[in-house]
Image (tube, rainbow, N blue to C red):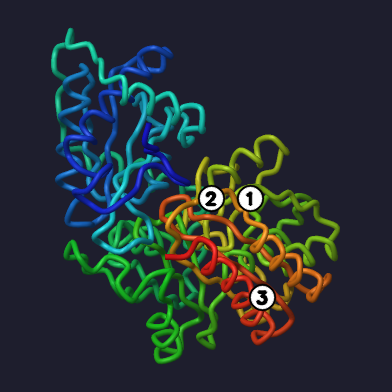
């Protein structure tokens, strides 16, 4: 049975398995059949949203056909950030939602993510059950077809209500000059609308999606253009989102990038949080920050849904990933780039400090991350050469660095991440382990 779900939903090259119309129509049927069995379908309504990739319309049509054939009505929310869909589902009578997006990936990739009626992503158990249903390929046809409706404005307006806490106090960001990079993606309309609603003086770049330029040399993965623009325009800071709007990367007034870990530390310090949930990919500097501030640091697997589960289990209301997925349970059940940007902007406003000053609260260790293509994903614990290489590096670094080697959840790649006191040491450590990876399982 071939795996469908990865770290964050189902993802792959558009028009190739599993992201092709025939497969996706049957995945929609399988999901509907499973939700009928669990009793999660009460109103027979699903909301589908998408980012700006050229393949989104094709996928939307396939999902619509699958759900309609199972007697479920479909509200097409159009282009909306992933967190916007999550919030809309949890604040409507929808039984579940589906986001069409490959997040920060290039335009030629795409994917789907499911959200339950409370705005949560599916657990591994849910995903495994849907996969089983898909391969059983036995769906009832005893349904009246569902109805499709275009409902973009309705759900966009619902999402904007999330920010009423800030807008009800007037225009809290009116003194700030901010550059927004919307990655030619799902935030191109919603992020400027929210920040204007809160009174910010904004300039927007990369907000002209054409189906093929999403994330292309822009957004959270490529903040170089934003850094240059912030300096040129003498802006207070810049905020950069990814293609589906669930990540935030910031740039200070000097054009220097802040990672998710740095943003998380600033916010945790401002609100005097006593517990942070983050992943194994978090920078060693975040752990050191938590130790210094007497904050409990809880570590999870990679993926914001695992961060969310950890937050619920640990009764924590703040958590995230170094990549910029930040979750604030007071407001949302998933990572939200726009919300994270608003909270950070409000902190800058309230403290009267520049972002370059606020970030000094945490020291970030130089990090090197290298992806090695592999022919197969043999369990790493079964490859002595890699284990020995990791052990050698860890002994060299001692407590002044760390190593993480893992497989990608969506691609045939082995990710080698090393942190050390200098860039040179981190690079040397990665290359040492990388040689073992290449020699044993490399392509």
Q: CA distance from mark 2 to mark 1?
A: 7 Å
Q: Which mark is residue 382?
A: 1
Q: CA distance from mark 3 to mark 2?
A: 40 Å
Please state the horizontal and vertical placement of residue 347, each as a whole percent of the image.
Answer: 62, 65
The correct choice, above or below, for 87 with respect to 275 in the image is above
Find numbered disc 3 in the image and state the secondary structure of the residue it sits on. Answer: helix
Comparing 45 with 35, the one in front is 35
Comparing 36 with 391, the one in front is 391
Please state the horizontal and vertical placement of residue 78, each as a whole percent of the image.
Answer: 22, 45
Kindly identify which residue carries mark 3: 359
Residue 258: name its quadrant: bottom right
Q: Residues within 10 Å of mark 3 (few under 14, many from 20)?
A: some
Residue 187: name its quadrant: bottom left
Left or right of 408 on screen, residue 73: left
Find numbered disc 2 in the image and state the secondary structure of the residue it sits on. Answer: loop
Labels 2 & 1 near each other (Cβ < 8 A) = yes
Labels 3 & 1 near each other (Cβ < 8 A) = no
Q: Earlier in the sequence, mark 3 or mark 2?
A: 3
Please state the horizontal and vertical placement of residue 411, each as a whole percent of the image.
Answer: 41, 55
Residue 269: name its quadrant: bottom right
The correct choice, above or below, for 95 with respect to 82 in the image is above
Kindly identify which residue carries mark 2: 378
Labels 3 & 2 near each other (Cβ < 8 A) = no
Comparing 158 with 246, the one in front is 246
Find numbered disc 1 in the image and state the secondary structure of the residue it sits on. Answer: helix
The correct choice, above or below, for 3 with respect to 366 in the image is above
Residue 427 in view (yes/no):
yes
Give the position of the C terminus as an image quadrant: bottom left
């Amino acid at each position: 049975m071939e795996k469908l779900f990865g770290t964050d939903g189902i993802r792959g090259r558009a028009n190739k398995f599993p992201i092709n119309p025939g497969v996706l129509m049957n995945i929609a049927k399988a999901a509907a059949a499973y939700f009928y069995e669990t009793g999660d379908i009460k109103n027979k309504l699903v909301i589908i949203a998408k980012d700006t990739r050229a393949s989104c319309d094709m996928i939307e049509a396939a999902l619509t056909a699958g759900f309609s054939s199972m007697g479920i009505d479909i509200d097409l929310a159009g282009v909306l950030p992933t967190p916007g869909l999550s919030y809309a589902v949890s604040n409507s009578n929808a039984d579940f939602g589906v986001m069409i997006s490959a997040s920060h990936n290039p335009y030629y990739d795409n994917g789907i993510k499911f959200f339950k009626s409370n705005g949560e992503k599916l657990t591994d158990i849910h995903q495994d059950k849907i996969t089983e249903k898909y391969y059983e390929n036995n769906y009832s046809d005893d349904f009246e077809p569902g109805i499709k409706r275009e409902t973009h404005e309705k759900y966009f307006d619902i999402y904007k209500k999330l920010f009423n806490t800030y807008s009800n106090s007037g225009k809290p960001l009116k003194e700030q000059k901010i550059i927004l990079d919307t990655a030619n993606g799902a935030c191109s309309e919603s992020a400027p609308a929210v920040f204007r609603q809160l009174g910010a003086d904004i300039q927007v770049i990369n907000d002209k999606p054409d189906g093929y330029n999403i994330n292309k040399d822009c957004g959270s993965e490529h903040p170089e253009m934003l850094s240059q623009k912030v300096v040129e325009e003498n802006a207070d800071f810049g905020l950069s989102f990814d293609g589906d709007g669930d990540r935030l990367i910031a740039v200070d007034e000097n054009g220097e990038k802040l990672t998710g870990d740095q943003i998380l530390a600033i916010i945790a310090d401002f609100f005097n949080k006593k517990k942070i949930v983050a992943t194994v990919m978090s920078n060693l500097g975040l752990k050191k920050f938590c130790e210094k501030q007497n904050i409990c640091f809880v570590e999870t697997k990679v993926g914001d849904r695992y961060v969310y589960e950890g937050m619920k289990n640990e009764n924590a209301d703040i958590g995230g990933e170094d990549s910029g997925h930040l979750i604030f349970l007071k407001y949302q059940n998933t990572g939200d780039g726009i919300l994270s940007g608003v909270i950070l902007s409000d902190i800058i406003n309230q403290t009267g400090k520049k972002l370059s000053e606020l970030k000094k609260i945490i020291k970030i260790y130089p990090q090197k991350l290298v992806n090695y293509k592999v022919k197969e994903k043999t369990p790493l614990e079964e490859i002595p050469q890699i284990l020995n290489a990791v052990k050698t590096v860890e002994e060299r670094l001692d407590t002044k660095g760390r190593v993480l080697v893992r497989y990608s959840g969506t691609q045939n790649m082995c990710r080698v991440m090393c942190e050390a006191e200098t860039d040179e040491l981190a690079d040397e450590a990665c290359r040492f382990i990388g040689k073992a990876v290449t020699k044993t399982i490399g392509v």
